Amino acid sequence: MSLTAGQGGSGAGSSGTPRGFAEHGSAHGGHGTETAPYERLFRGERLAQLEQLFTLYPTKQACLLPALWMIQEARGWISEPAIGEVAEVLGLTPAYVKGVVTFYTMYHTHPVGRHFIQVCTTTPCNICGAEDVVRALLEQTGCRELGATSPDGRFTVIEVECLGACGFATPILVDDDFIENVTPEKIAGILQRYE
Amino acid sequence: MGYPHPSHPKENPVLSKHFGDPEARSFDGWVKRGGYEALRKVLRMSPEAVVEEIKTSGLRGRGGAGFPTGLKWSLMPKADGRPHYLVCNADESEPGTFKDREIMRWTPHQLLEGCAIAAYAIGAERCYIYIRGEFTEPLKIMQQAIDEATAKGAVGANVFGSGKRIEMIIHRGAGAYICGEETAMLNSIEGKRGNPRIKPPYPAQAGVFGMPTTINNVETLAAVPHIIMRGGEWYKGLALGNPKSTGTKLISVCGHIQRPGNYEVTMGTPMKELIYEMCGGMRPGRTLKAVIPGGSSVPIMSAAEAEDCLLDYEGVVAKGSMLGSAGMIVMDDTTDMVYQIWRLARFYAHESCAQCTQCREGTAWSVRILERILTGKGKQEHFQLLLDLSDNMTGKTICVLSDSCAAPIVSGIQKFRHEFEAYIQGAREPAMAGV
Amino acid sequence: MADELVNVTIDGAPVSVPKGTTIIEAAKQAGILVPHYCYHPALPVSPALCRMCLVEVEKAPKLMPACVTQVAEGQVVHVGSDKALKAREGVLELLLINHPLDCPICDQAGECELQDYVFQEGRAGTRYSEYAKRYSPVEDFGPDVLYVPNRCILCTRCVRFMEDVAEEPVLNVSERGDRAYIGISPEQRLDHPWSGNVVDLCPVGSLISKDFLHKARAWDLDKTASVCPGCSQGCNITIDTRDDVVVRIRPRPNLEVNRHFICDYGRMNYRWLNRGDRVEAPLVKDGGRHLASDWDTALDRLGQLVRGLSGSAVILASGRASTESLGLVKLMLGRLSVTAAVQVPVGDEAPLVGVPNLALRPERAPNLTGAELLGYRTDWAEALRQVTSAGLVIVLDADLSEADQGLIAAGPGVVVVLGTVWADGLRSAELVLPVTNMAEENGTYVNRDRRIQRFNQAKSQPGMARPAWWIAGEVLAGPGPSASAPSTAAEAFELLGDKWPLFAGLTYSEMGYTGRALEAGGEGVGESQRVDLGVM
């Protein structure tokens, strides 16, 4: 079992299409693309929210993680144009922002399913059967593969490193819901709650 | 969601006294349980006196390094016109550790009160509480608590009418174990990649935004109000094993154990009592094989070492490991040690920030060697290679992430070499296919 | 405090350095190179992340990074101890596990810090043979820069240069762990006017120049200390030639002028040095045609011309002419009323924000200040007006427009071209004397901050071409064998002191290879007898 796109795994750029030598752009990581024209997020109320954040830190740059969270909460993932917008409102460059985005694994650089499921499989959960939970989740969501979105667009399942609830193995995070003591038997019931 | 276990008589619940009690979560509920008295008391003391009290208590950092808290506070420069900051490390990500989460879930005001006292002691007007991004519930609860405490005047622009400003700001992480390393955390707050910084300068000289900063773990800060109320001498008296390890400690116990959970014990409590009495021992028919006592970053202990170990900083070191963050991973005789060591190495390879060569390449290579062994392609040379690599990854990098990857590998080979041999010699079926 | 000295011993060598010096710099003072990758003296902060410079410091519990550890009194440091060597061997082994080992096709080979250190103290073989190496395709970062991720050791020098020196962070470290790579924003290109420096900073062959791609092996190159002829900044450079052809220009450190950098304009501005359409023999007008002649004949003719003339003369000089040539050509016309002008093409300014007083200057004339000190004026149009009444016009390798050539040809004066090339519009010139370009001669330029700096001959002159100062010096000395004609640029420079006291007493050896600041003085300054020279 190995980690997949968005979570790294061994080998750089495993998910990117190899590109030619003179072509412009990153051959790594294969950032997702948006089909619709980009609509700015930081306007009106959201801009006011962001400006409120500015008062909490001595630099605008420090608002980068919170601003990225705002994007992801509103849009589900962080696209290249979104990176550009965040860079602009915070006085940074897109390259800088992207370096930060790709450091933190919770930011999605690709669109994901309507419900994003993160399963802890690090040692403490692993010895308590976390891999069985993963297998059951992949099967019952129809995702088949880690990092892939189910054909109905409903779920994406990934393995994550320690969720910090080792005494309640196996914990999973469905969107923002932290669910403990998950076993393969409980999965059907859990999935029912997410349309 | 109820708390999984009632307190065991051998526990000494100080921080965890109100775990499982939903009423303790609210400001009023916390005040009813004696909350915020310590903060009121502190406001009548000088900051120096607060630091002295903590020094007396012998409180040491509960995040893993065990640095004396009072001493850390005293390293902050005196008021020099520059802003000072307190950073509360709530990025609990060390595999096996889940105590800070419970403190935040059940007693958010206990933590806020500790933060406010610490901020007062070090002359900080702002405290950033860095909570890992995955902790959705603690994030919500802590924000509610801050809102409530601010409304009640316990924190904010004028703490209990004292004229002191102590603001609490939650900074949400976004999935990076290394941000639990204090200088990486500072970078993350500043909106940067969570790369650990070189020391010196130490955070007390130049921390977040280049200003004097103290970083304390959640559990450390949560202990502070109790020390203020009951006195440093009282806390210092809570020591069964070694006078250098004082107070109580939340031990997170997980893995192959009857009753996993957080157990608050007096420093120096025998590990054997914790495992077999408080936690109810192994699952029926199983025996203890190994314990990783301090979160996954410390050397693995054999069953014999564990059963003879006292739970305090010195006691665990005496058995060849470290108390660390006291996340105890208990493994019984069904555990495939090679597989689990591989799984740990994979964790570190995934979390390496990519700065230091030894860590970036060494963790990933270690994973591959272990995969070789697990797929039945292991060789005798792999032992030496793993040990060489581990040596190369120990004590040579900016932070200790690569040391943490090496620790279970080296101790694993020392103590469970026969399990590696079984894979290498084909006596055991490969645990994974391919590679 | 800056003067307070600290005594340390490094590999047995005692050395005293100012307090605050890092071990790596102190070791340099002791003549010991501590192998390193991420540290670079030109970049403001060392991240100490490659861990290559770990050294053993007695009494320290761990090996210490020499690039950020400051020396302490009485410290004993071991760079070559077993422990330090073992640590470096370990780093090198890890840097190589995913490295393609494609030195035979890598431009960096021969000047690669990875290759050098591995050869010096790395393991003989790999222990990583069981695995496929990480592979990522080459990427196009900008107009002249390619990124070869497979060779990258993630020292981050390039990222830090763009961030901290150019202050335009278009590069980043993306991802983390062993998946990390140097990324660029898809919105942006690495096209900052100083971005070529990342190629020099890259210690391995990961960032490479398209211009230099597969042009030469490092060991085939001859390297010559020089000064950039691109603008009036006077950046110190090294001219790399292969088989007498200039193939690359790279910065040469000079903390007073350009630190460790040059701009891309200067870097790319070398092809003219290799021009093939050069005048290779003195051409003397003979009726309606020009005859290739020997130098004696040509110099006689020039001498007669200069001595036989009275009235006014005009010198139209290239801003790339050396101080020696500008000075001696002017001295040669000492008797006449001379209007001397220097050509100053103008372009955009491009500062390197992170370094004070460093920019590609609008004045694209490396010796503008030198020319001004010698009494040359920059009013080109006025000089051209003087052509209409002058008895002699000397074109000192100036790039003339067709219109200007026509104006000169139509003028009453005798035209003498001291040129690298012979423009079509000046076919009527009395004499066309082949001169060397700045890569073919020794000489000096004075930069905009009045720093006089030497450049050296990097390639041989074509045919019979000579420096213009040699031609003027021979004429000044008069016909026949004479001891007074300068035979080297250094001697030519010494002749300038008589007329221009600012240069008096200064010698080439005093200038060394980083130059000397000239004393301050007013405009036009250099001259002791301005009246005599009849400057407008």
Image: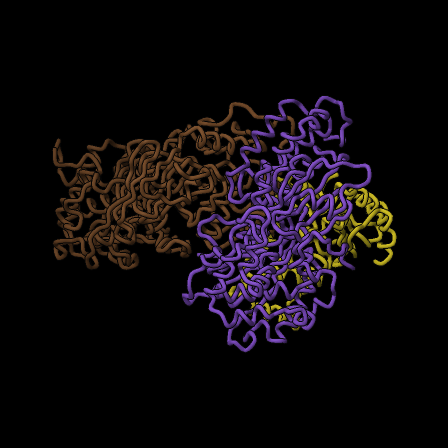
Chain colours: A yellow, B purple, C brown
Locate residue C383 relative to residue B229 in the image: left or right: left
Residue B165 at x, y percent in the picture? 52, 72
B270 relative to C164, above or below:
above
In the depicted view, which residue is nearer to us: B297 or B401? B297
Residue at 55% across / 64% down in the picture? Answer: B228
| Residue C135 appears in the picture as rendered | no
Q: Which quadrant of the figure has residue C482? A: top left
A77 relative to C435, above or below:
below
Quadrant where the image shows the C terminus of chain B: top right
Locate residue C286 relative to residue A142 in the image: left or right: left
- Report how many numbered discs are placed on residues in the image: 0
C162 relative to B112, above or below:
above
Quadrant where the image shows the N terminus of chain B: bottom right
Residue C384 at x, y percent in the picture? 28, 56
Residue lying farthest to the bottom in this orientation: B161
Residue at 62% across / 29% down in the picture? Answer: B414
In the depicted view, which residue is nearer to us: B425 or C171? B425
Residue B420 at x, y percent in the picture? 69, 27
C106 relative to A156, above or below:
above
Residue A35 at x, y percent in the picture? 73, 57
| Residue C82 appears in the picture as rendered | yes
Locate residue C351 relative to residue A133 in the image: left or right: left
Locate residue C204 relative to residue C71 in the image: left or right: right
In the depicted view, which residue is nearer to us: C425 or B145? B145
Residue at 68% across / 73% down in the picture? Answer: B28
Residue at 65% across / 50% down in the picture? Answer: B93
In the depicted view, which residue is nearer to us: B203 or C531? B203
